[in-house]
């Protein structure tokens, strides 16, 4: 029994070693390039969208060392596909309607020192050519963009 408790405490400590904090900020959703719902009320869709982006950035920030803080501001959002307002109110996903995220971000270490600060336009013009991994959820392409950005910019900045 003592071995099990010791192992559990060890695992908890190992997972606690990486526990950065992520904050997300948004501009006015009405000013974004394409955050139109297909068959949902606009306000509810925007709230759901914000919650999903916040949750995903928080998940990415958990990979940061303890005490690190990541602030991300979404300056513009252009979701994959295009909302068509006809009888069906659907989002048509074609390669010409690729996802785009214009973000500003700032990473601060556990001593309060700025590690990196920048503004970038993330886009994936060949988003439909890539193999989808795992279960598909909403905002799959946009989350994949954020994952790629995190690995190429944030994780790299932490290592250096």
Image: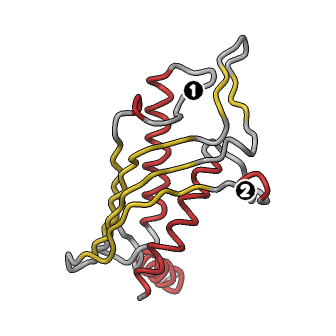
Q: How is the image coloured?
A: secondary structure
Q: Is label 2 in a helix, a strand or a loop?
A: loop
Estimate how packed mark 2 is, as few (under 14), some (14 to 19) or many (20 or more) residues with alpha carbons within 10 Å.
few
Looking at this view, name the residue that lies furthest to the left: 112
Residue in view at x 38 percent, y 78 percent: 65
Q: Residue at x 44, y 36 (%)?
A: 32
4 displayed left or right of 83: left
Q: Residue at x 47, y 73 (%)?
A: 153
Badge 1 is on which residue? 37
Measured as percent of width and height from the top left, residue 130 is found at 77, 59
Q: Nearer the viewer, residue 48 or 147?
A: 147
Q: Secondary structure at mark 1?
A: loop
Q: Nearer the viewer, mark 1 or mark 2?
A: 2
Check the image and report above or below for 49 versus 155.
Answer: above
- Camera-side residue: 16 or 144? 144
Q: In this rendering, is residue 4 above or below 61? A: below
> Which residue sits at x=74%, y=59%?
133
Picture coordinates of residue 127, whole percent (x, y) = 71, 54
Place of residue 21 in the rendered image (x, y in percent of width and height, measured from the top left): 34, 64
Q: Hey, which quadrant is residue 88 in on the image?
A: top right
Label 1 and label 2: CA atoms lie apart by 23 Å
Checking the image for residue 126, the label placed there is 2
Lateral position of residue 31 relative to residue 86, left or right: left
Q: With respect to residue 89, does 110 lie above or below?
A: below
């Amino acid at each position: 029994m003592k071995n099990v408790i010791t192992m559990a405490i060890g695992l908890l400590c190992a997972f606690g070693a990486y526990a950065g904090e992520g904050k997300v900020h948004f501009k006015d959703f009405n000013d974004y390039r394409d955050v139109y719902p297909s068959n949902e009320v606009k306000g509810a869709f925007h709230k759901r969208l914000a919650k999903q982006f916040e949750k995903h950035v928080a998940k990415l920030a958990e990979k940061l060392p303890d005490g690190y803080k990541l602030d991300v501001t979404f300056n513009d959002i252009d979701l994959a596909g295009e909302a068509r307002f006809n009888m069906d109110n659907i989002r048509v996903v074609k390669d010409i309607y690729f996802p785009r995220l214009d973000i500003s971000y700032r990473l601060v270490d556990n001593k309060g020192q700025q590690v990196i600060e920048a503004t970038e336009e993330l886009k994936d013009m060949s988003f439909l050519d890539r193999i989808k991994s795992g279960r598909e959820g909403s905002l799959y392409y946009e989350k994949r963009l954020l994952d790629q950005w995190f690995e190429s910019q944030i994780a790299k900045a932490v290592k250096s």
